[in-house]
Image (cartoon, rainbow, N blue to C red):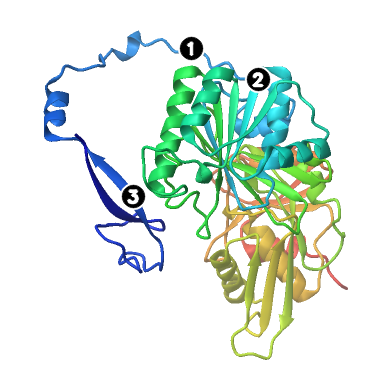
Amino acid sequence: MAKVRTRFVCQACGRTAPRYLGRCPQCGEYGSMVEQIVEEPASDQKLRRTSSGPVSTPRPLREIVTDGVDRMPLPLEEFSRVLGGGIVPGSLVLVGGDPGIGKSTLLLEVAALMAGLHGPVLYVSGEESARQIKMRADRLGLDPERLYLVTETNLNVMLAHVESLKPVMVIVDSIQTTYTDALSSTAGSVSQVRQCASAFQELAKNTGTTVFLVGHVTKEGNIAGPRVLEHIVDTVLYLEGDQFHRYRLLRSVKNRFGATSEVGVFEMVEKGMVEVPNPSEAFLAERQANAPGSSIAVPMEGTRPLLVEIQALASTTTFPNPRRTANGIDYNRLLLLTAVLGRRVGVALHDKDVFVNVVGGLQIDEPAADLAVATAIASGVRDRPVHADMVLVGEVGLSGELRTVSQLETRLKEAAKLGFRRCVIPRSPGRQPLEAPNGLELIACRSLREALDVALISRS
């Protein structure tokens, strides 16, 4: 007989304890300990497992034949791009995001496309009724013949439906509401989430059925607690965005069948999630040219370059500690750039509140946007606009120097395609000069001070 014992696991850091604790002794979170049931095999079972022969056979690497993965294409280009070119049969995909961001709407559209092109699709909902899903499908104009809906939270019943229907894709919305009778803990606990995800992984690998799991993001930004699902699944997708912005970004942070950090851009409209084929043009559609405090950056999202507007505002403050507010960029990066501007360039910011915003709700994490952010701040302080046909690419060092960035050629091609005529880039003495795309003039600068002299329009 198997021995059953109970332990408690912190959902924030994963610390285990033999009894319930109101506060985790490792991370200090309150109320984060959840019960987990652990089954230990008896001693005789352990002996039988160790004494039995191996069930797998090692094979030389050169004798293993690899077959190309046949992807199932979708007319939803942005979704296929994030997955690496299409849906891989037998893959397990986790889709996470904040509640109400549009995960169910996007996956319902994907399910309808798959049902119309490749075969039956089973949509399992543990949070909404079939009537609610039907109302959403009617609003989106979806009426596929081979899309099946069921409201269920029991894992064994779900697997029975899959066995009888034999769909090409299963969507589970959400994994937090799914439970198995093998464990006594409640649905949504760490043990239930891990056990149910492992069962769906076995289903996907043994039958070739593609499984999409919907996971809600906690306050700490993790899916279903301490990232208990990301090592089980093949692909992890995050749907990001702000409820006050119409754009949604589908970002890949793990993908065993393609490149990571790919981004698909969607627009939330009345008819559902509509893909944006040219995100750069959409982000710059409402830009006001020749406005002080505005510049254009070219960050890379995966393999795709995006042109976004950086806005900065500096206002005089009466408080001893001026504020620094960053929306769309890292706060510590903003502190670094303001310090460089004040110390190396002479832009007085000690008595000014500085606000920086990335238009469109995009989050920029790479340092290639440093030059554009610093230029926007200097433009707002000096009340001198940046040239309307200029983009800025480069990393700013602590000495005020400009450093080269990766994939510069790809960024330049995207800027030239959207009609920009000039681009400020770092000057690298030991590097061969770049070949500028047609119609784009490259201005190489060694320092931030030199770049500001070139980028800002004189008021005289």
User: Would you name the residue on which mark 2 appears?
Assistant: 120
User: Would you name the residue on which mark 3 appears?
Assistant: 36
Q: Where is residue 301 in the image (x, y as percent from the top left)?
A: 63, 43
Residue 434 visible at all: no
Q: Looking at the picture, which amino acid does disc 2 mark?
A: Pro
Q: Looking at the picture, which amino acid does disc 1 mark?
A: Asp
**Closest to the observer: 102 or 384?**
102
User: Would you name the residue on which mark 1 appears?
Assistant: 67
Query: Residue drawn 67% across and 41% down?
Result: 129
Query: Residue drawn 83% across and 33% down?
Result: 141
> Label 2: few (<14), some or many (≥20) within 10 Å?
many
Quadrant including the N terminus: top left
What SS does tag 2 mark? Answer: loop
Q: Where is residue 403 in the image (x, y as percent from the top left)?
A: 56, 54
What SS does tag 1 mark? Answer: loop
Residue 234 visible at all: yes
Q: From the viewer's perspective, is the residue at label 1 or at label 3 nearer?
A: 3
Does the CB distance between marks 2 and 3 fall below 8 Å? Answer: no
Q: Earlier in the sequence, mark 2 or mark 1?
A: 1
Whole-number angstrom distance, CA of label 2 to CA of label 1: 25 Å
Q: Looking at the picture, which amino acid does disc 3 mark?
A: Gln
Does the CB distance between marks 2 and 1 fall below 8 Å? Answer: no
Whole-number angstrom distance, CA of label 1 to CA of label 3: 40 Å
Q: From the viewer's perspective, is the residue at label 2 or at label 1 nearer?
A: 2
Query: Residue drawn 68% across and 75% down?
Result: 354
Q: Earlier in the sequence, mark 2 or mark 3?
A: 3
Is residue 330 left or right of 33 when viewed as pictured?
Answer: right
